[in-house]
Image (tube, rainbow, N blue to C red):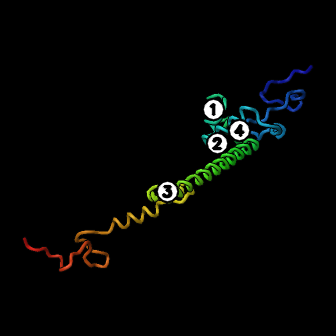
Amino acid sequence: MEKQELTGWASPESMEGAPAPRPCDFAPPDPGSLDGPLNRRQERFCYAFVQTANAAEAAEDAGYSWRARRQQGWRLLRDPRIRDRIAEIQAELAREKCHARDTLLGKLEMVYLKAIESGNLPAAARAVALQAKLAGIDAAPARARRREVAAVPTGNAATPDGAPGGAAVAGGGESDGM
């Protein structure tokens, strides 16, 4: 056997039989590991991520260690199976919410019809307002118009065209002398 010098660098000849270098930690996941169903922890991560929209919190909720939660969350979100499952859960929740909204709109319609039938106009108006809110119709523009009307100047303030504003009294605005 030949004696090798210890210089700190290994020559290609001295590397024969040595284990292959490890891939770096941030290498893309092995495509073979992305096949098959998600395990229970990954499934819990998906549901937790839908609720929190935070990968670190979702990883901790799924059972990953507190210290590794950020890295695990980041790693899990890179997995296309995880991303697909999160999209499925979000779509399922959207369908359920839409169904619940339609049911509530139908019930409010019944309340509206009964209120009109009995002559209870405030209840009918409230049912319509709630239907609009559930349908996503914003009542803010009507409120803004009311604020504009309320902001009309009163008193002796001048209007934009220079005429005196406010509630003018017929007869020149003079008071009867008392």
> Viewed as shown, does residue 55 lie left or right of 175?
right
Q: Is residue 42 above or below residue 142?
A: above
- Between the residue at mark 3 and the residue at mark 4, the CA separation in whole angstroms equals 53 Å
For image coordinates 76% across by 39% down, the residue present is 27
Residue depicted at 70% across the width and 41% down the height: 77
> In the rendered structure, which amino acid carries the disc numbered 4?
Leu
Q: Which amino acid, by three-letter code, is at mark 2?
A: Val
* Residue identifier under label 3: 115
Q: Which of the pair 162/12 is nearer the observer?
A: 162
Q: Tag on residue 139?
A: none
Q: What's the CA distance linking mark 4 and mark 2?
A: 13 Å
Asked whether the beta carbons under mark 3 and mark 4 sit within 8 Å of each other, the answer is no
Q: Amino acid at mark 3?
A: Ala
Percent of width and height locating residue 48? 64, 37
Residue 175 in percent (x, y) is at 13, 73
Q: Nearer the viewer, mark 1 or mark 4?
A: 1
Question: Which disc is residue 50 wearing?
Answer: 2
Alpha carbon distance from label 3 to label 1: 47 Å
Residue at image mark 1: 61
Residue at image coords 32%, 76%: 160
Query: How far across and down, in percent of the image, does residue 81 sit?
Result: 76, 42
* Kind of element beneath mark 2: helix
| Left or right placement of residue 127 versus residue 157 in this view | right
Quick check: marks 2 and 3 in contact, CB under 8 Å? no
